[in-house]
Amino acid sequence: MKLNNYKNILLSGLLVLAACKPKVDVEPASNGGVDFSAYIAVGDSQTAGYADGGLYRTGQINSFPNIIAEQLKAVGGGNFSQPLFSEAQASGTGYRKIDKFNADGTPSIVDVPATAVRSANPVLFTKYTGENNNYGIPGIKVIHTSIAGYGNLNPYFERVLTSSYPAANTTYLDYITAKPYTFFTSWLGNNDALGYATAGGVSETLTDKSVFAAAYSAVIEKLTAGGKKGTIATVPDVSAIPFFNTVTIPVLLAAVQRAAPSVTTLYVNARKTSDAGTATYEARAATTADLITLTFPTSKLGVNGYGVSPLNPIENQYVLDANEVTLVKDYVNAYNQTITSLAASKGLALFDAYAFLNTVKQKGLLINGVNLSAIYISGGLFSLDGVHLTPKGYAIIANEFIKATNAKYGSNVPQADINKYNSVIFP
């Protein structure tokens, strides 16, 4: 009898607990009054899905606009077409992959050859002639958007135009607004600083601040004609990416000291001032504020005094020195002031990519129990080129665009499940 009483008491308790279990209300998906039926994506290589040093089919399929478009289907989004390379030419313009691990545990990275090249001189890629909603063009700067004939200079753009080299004269701005659309995302401006930075300030220039402001304003003015809504993003801090945080001065010095313990200093050819108008350089001792590029050929270090003598310093193209870092940040901050101001004046949603990626660099991310960071390869976010993202990284960026859109327009576009997307693939 007592046992039955205990059973009854236990059962009653469980029923009470079940009755008290909190109910989680999930808000239904909603467009917030925004017409998402015809979505276009404006931008550069990040928008195109560029990854691992190239544009190829898998990267395109996992582009952040394509991920956004999939989520928009829950709130009235329509078809989203991309200029995909065919399955027969899936490696596209070529890319990098890890084929094995060396005896010391380091990854062996190899090049996968391009399959979509129709001309070698000049380089031209296989034409795409289908529908397109993803207008991401690798290499494009804001200042290129109104240049007639830009397609003759950029094979990624020439590939999607109906005209061909040397008569690819449509401007990017005309191309992206040629067909009707109801909503857009724009992540332009990255290359106006990134090209200068990754070249160590040697072969590229920073876009003049006022020129950037005028060009970016013209793009947004045309995109928002008729009251079109959209979400735009700021330009990231170039010093937040693995391209500048993997091969460091301490790492290089430690490598040298294993063979030559007496070496205590490395030398770089560095800009003497952060004044934009004074581009003079001198050899000096390197500091941790000098950022070495991921592409630095470490085999050169120490040969004929390379990098260990002020008479043979690490060359400009392999280092974004402290003054160049300051200069780039100053320009990027000016670009972002333009972008932020236009978002406010035009009533657009804003994703602050600058703040987001700096936070990722400083603190990492914990999403769905997965730890992610800006560390090269193992961090999970950045691809093998150290600049562009992995599919998982692009899914996270897609969700940040979605969050900004929902916050601005009162919509409830569901976020993508990042666990569906891979990071760097290991053999």
Image (cartoon, helix red, strand yellow):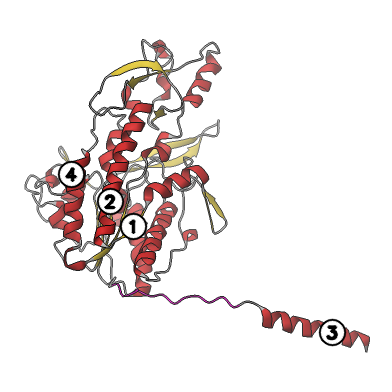
**What residue is shown with label 1?**
350
Residue at x-position 90% and y-position 84%: 3
The three-letter amino acid code for the residue at tag 2 is: Ile
Query: In the rendering, at what x and y percent does residue 259 appear?
Result: 53, 15
| Spatial separation of the CA atoms under disc 1 and disc 4 | 21 Å
Determine whether the residue tagged by mark 1 lies in a helix, strand or loop: strand
The N terminus - image quarter:
bottom right
Q: Is residue 320 visible?
A: no
What number is the disc on residue 5? none
Rendered position, 310 above or below 416:
above
Query: In the rendering, at what x and y percent does residue 103 appear?
Result: 55, 31
Binning the other alpha carbons within 10 Å of mark 3 as few (below 14), some (14 to 19) or many (20 upward) gives: few
Pointer 1 or 4: first along the chain: 4
Give the magenta part as a residue range: 23-34
Q: Nearer the viewer, residue 329 or 318?
A: 329
Residue at x-position 41% and y-position 53%: 391
**What residue is shown with label 2?**
339
